[in-house]
Structures are given as structure tokens and as C-alpha cells.
Amino acid sequence: MEQKKMAIIATKGTLDWAYPPFILASTAAALGYETQIFFTFYGLQLVRKDLSVLKVSPLGNPGMPMKMPFGPKWFKSINWNMPNAIQAIIPGYENVATALMKQTIANNGVATIPDLRELCQEAEVKFIACQMTVELFGFEHSDFIDGLEYGGAATFFEFAGETDICLFI
Amino acid sequence: MNFDKELDARGLNCPLPILRAKKALAEVESGQVLKILSTDPGSVKDFAAFAKQTGNELLSTAEAGGEFTFFMKKK
């Protein structure tokens, strides 16, 4: 049987949206897929050397439960969602939400993004960064991890055209 | 059941049990058996799907007190 293939375009640069591409790519690789991720626009943040830039924002995100990762059960079950206008004026709101989410992730035995990214690389998932966006956003190649290839849309299609699964995230 | 290697994936969540199992399987010979412990309820369906897609044989799945035990034979 010919090896199956999967391509993903990763376009989001937040902590929460970092998960789907890396979870799917690492799992696909474990299942024997040849896998490639094309990082473009905000998705470039996922291949930065410094992943502390990844944050999660509850602002304008009504789907996000705001629950505390510590305390007794009754306390953990409270949903602290606040009106957008209030979230917007509290300094450091995103940093606090990000810290709480990281704690929740740890509590649940969910892998961290640096771990998942490394698992992808170990499994030989190919990472391609969009050269156009690198320039557009004023990044340098030295901002990114080693092992990246840089290319454009045509580079993506070369592989994507032969895939069994192709996702835009 | 006899097994050749054991993987403790308890406390880990999707997709880590599968990724660790893949790694552990790489360290045993064809025909040898890997025992996997997990607490992730999603891993029951996931290990069945993993076996089906990779050709490794899922010999058994058991649950006791919220803990799952799988035996998988390497292709």
C-alpha cells in the first residue's frame, strides 16, 4: 500500500489554535502518514524559537469557558466569563488567562506546545514557513527554529496535490 | 497475558498515549506484545483505530476502576 499523505495549512498564532495542527500532524505521523505543515500569516508564531509569544485571549471569544484550574470542585466549576468591555480594560487580562490555561493543560495531562512540536519534528513532519509572510511581518530566519524550509504557495501545492487529507486551520 | 514491554501512559491525554505507544512499538520486535496502561477514556477508541490503520494487532482491551489496559502485538 502506498504511504498516505496529509498536508495542513496553519494560519493561527494563539496558544489554543496551536494545538490542532500539532496534534493532527503528530498523530498522522504515528499512523504512518507522510505529513507536512505549511505555516503562514499568524501561524508563523508556531515555529518561532520563543513560544512564549503564544497567548490565549478570552476577549471576543464566547466559546471559551473561563474556569479556575485550582481549588475545590465547586469553585472550579464556576464560569467567570466577563463582558468584553470589562475584559478589554483590565491590564494583563490575556496574560492571566494564558497562565490559567497552561495550568489547566498541565492538570489534564495534555501535552505542551513545545513538546508536541518536538514530537512532530522527531516523527519527521516537514515544516514549511511562508517566505512572503516572513518578510511581510518583518521576521528574520533566525527568529525561527532550525529545520524549517521556506517557500511559497507553489511549494505547498507540490505536496498538497498528492495528499489524502488536506486541512486549513 | 504475556508481554515483552510495558508502557505506562496513565495521566496522559490525547494524543500522547498513541504517540508513546508508537515509540514503544518501535522498540520491540515484530510479533512481540506491548502492554499499555491508560486513564484517557478516549484511548479505547483511539487504540482500536490506531491498530486498524497501522496493522498492529490489538489483542485485548480491558477496563477496571477507570484504568484501561491494552495488549498490542507488533505487526
Image: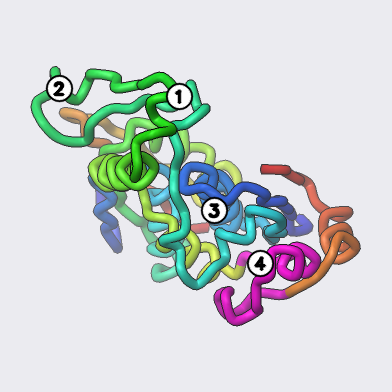
Total marks shown come to: 4
Label 2: chain? A
User: Of the numbered discs in the image, which one, if any, rests on residue A22?
Assistant: 3
**Which one is nearer the viewer's eye here, A11 or A36?**
A11
Q: Are marks 1 and 3 in contact (CB under 8 Å)?
A: no
Q: Amino acid at mark 4?
A: Phe
- Measuring 57% from the left and 60% from the top, which residue is drawn there? A45
Q: Secondary structure at mark 2?
A: helix
Mark linked to residue B12:
none
Q: CA distance from mark 2 to mark 3?
A: 32 Å
Q: How many C-alpha atoms fall within 10 Å of the one at disc 4: few (<14), some, or many (≥20)?
A: many
User: Which label's residue is closer to the chain start, 4 or 2?
Assistant: 2
Q: Which circle marks residue A75 in the picture? A: 2
Q: Which residues are magenta?
A: A125-149
- Residue A139 lies in the magenta-colored region: yes
Instruction: Name the kind of residue labelled 1 in the image.
Output: Asn
Residue named by callout 4 = A127
Q: Residues within 10 Å of mark 1 (few under 14, many from 20)?
A: few
Q: Nearer the viewer, residue B55 or B22?
A: B22
Residue in the picture at 28% in, 41% down = A100
In the picture of the structure, the residue carrying the numbered disc 1 is A84
Asked if disc 4 and disc 2 are in contact, CB closer than 8 Å, the reply is no
- Does A86 appear above or below B70? above
